[in-house]
Amino acid sequence: MDDAGTHAQPTRRKDGRDAARNPLRIAIVGSGPAGFYAAQALLRSGRQLTVDVLDRLPVPYGLVRHGVAPDHQKLKSVTTLFEKVGRSDNFSFRGNVTVGRDVSIADLKDTHHAVVLAYGAATGRSVGIDGENLPGSLSATEFVGWYNGHPDYRDLDVALDTSAAVVLGHGNVAVDVARILAKPAPALASSDIAAHALDALGNSRIREIHVVGRRGPVQSKISPKELRELGGLEDCDVTVRPDELALNTESRAELDDPRAEEAQRRLQLFESFAIPSRGSVARRIEFRFLSSPVAIDGDTRVRGIMLERTRLCGKPFSQHAEGTGEHYRLEAGLVIRSIGYSGLPIDDGVPFDVDRGIVPNVDGRVMSRGTPLPGLYCTGWIARGPRGLIGDNREHGVRTAKNVLEDFPEDATRDARPGIAAIDRLLAARGIRSVCMDGWRRIDESERGRGQRLGKPREKYTCIEEMLEHAAEPARS
Ligand code: NAP
């Protein structure tokens, strides 16, 4: 391995013991923003420690690589910071290692003092309605993974041979999905969108995109910035039915709250869309409110979706949608549900809250029956649920790192742990080809080179075997 990550700076401690021989060894599971921000906070602490980050994919950066929309390249510049963390002496990366299968949490605990779970929320929630499994019905996780070149979704069959699509949910992911469906393919060609997706979107027949929310415009979770961007799309109308913008008393009270500046801006934008469609554009995005999915219909593939009109019930800020019994149907050959993500359990030894899709924790300390489990921590979406922007993980990572360091004080005695060297031996014995930071750099360089030839920032490898091939050290002649 060429970034063995075990080079703690040798400093003698006052008590005469050599701290560098027994650094605090921390394993982090997941190399997305949560994992890298936690690694950064630990490495900045000035303590004698090593940080080993493992990821199931051969490539790092999780949601930044496979979640952030390709036409939002600026958001991906955070990888410059992560690259810097990756160059730290006491850092190592091992990709292509599935924790819970290739190595267990028990293996990591045997070889490290602390394990931080930062593996995110990898699955799309299902609505639980008939027809959800028909061809043409997808989760946003699948669709986003497909256009971003995630190896799990490269062969996804996306029904773009249809004139209408329905996107369920009024969050920022729904807007990403609608925008990618609505944009002319040439406008995506200079992004890092996967080649297979660019080709397929170039031949898309979709003209109407209905973005459906079960509550009203005030309760929508879409950021005004994202809405404004939609409004400026080339050759695309964004429309709202004026009657669906009518507000009840409770929603007006929500808008009057001094903290409601974002909701007010959002409503103004929705109001600006409530004008007749220009009619001559290539595509149209229509926001629908107060509509809850009831069933997806079709025989061998999706043909449409039945929705129930809802009304809002409850007090301001806790209004929920209740069915009115009135139904309507939207014809569509593609339904993408973007109703939030959920985490998955990782290993038998780790508690999991099935209802919330998170690892139960108090401030990042993993809890079992009300007691913290020694040496086990979590951070990011797997700790607090799938909410917030990339940068929000920084604060959480800092807090989790602080707790790890508090639980392992500098002057306390502890057993020495072998760290990544022992994990490497286990992986070798189990026939797992892991990818280190230098291996990733080789993949990165090759992807950038492919991209440059096409006028893109990179052309991603979307197949694990291909990634492993390019991660390998070139043979010496
Ligand atoms: P989200 O913001 O939680 O939105 C989920 C949407 O799904 C809500 O409109 C919710 O409605 C709806 N929903 C949930 N269950 C439903 C059901 N059973 N039936 C119908 N609708 C249902 O989640 P997200 O869009 O996946 O985003 C996740 C996080 O990533 C967010 O914090 C988001 O801001 C962030 N993100 C940011 C960007 C960006 O800044 N560019 C881009 C992408 C994602 P209710 O409100 O009624 O529950």
Image (cartoon, grey):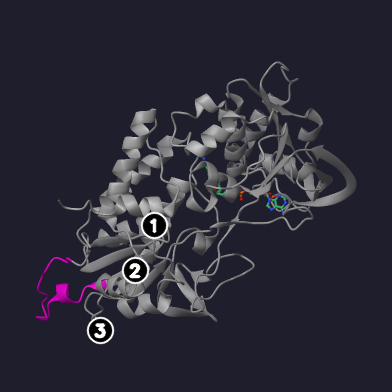
- The CA span between labels 1 and 3 is 27 Å
The local secondary structure at tag 1 comes to loop
- The CA span between labels 2 and 3 is 16 Å
The local secondary structure at tag 3 comes to loop
Point out residue 465 in the picture as x, y percentages from the top left corner: 40, 54
Which quarter of the figure has residue 329?
A: top right
Q: Nearer the viewer, residue 191 or 318?
A: 191
> Could you tell whether 122 is left or right of 214 in the image?
left
- Residue ID for mark 2: 27
Point out residue 2 in the picture as x, y percentages from the top left corner: 20, 59
In front: label 1 or label 3: 1
For the stretch drawn in magenta, what is the main secondary structure? Answer: loop
Residue 60 is at least partly visible in this image? no
- Residue ID for mark 1: 31
Q: Name the amino acid, label 2.
A: Ala
Q: Name the amino acid, label 1.
A: Ser
Q: Nearer the viewer, residue 314 or 11?
A: 11
Q: CB atoms at circles 2 and 3 under 8 Å apart? A: no
Give the residues drawn in magenta, as a range.
7-24
Q: Nearer the viewer, residue 365 or 418?
A: 418
Q: Name the amino acid, label 3.
A: Asp
Point out residue 438 in the picture as x, y percentages from the top left corner: 25, 53
At 31% from the left and 77% from the top, the residue drawn is: 111
Numbered badge on residue 415:
3
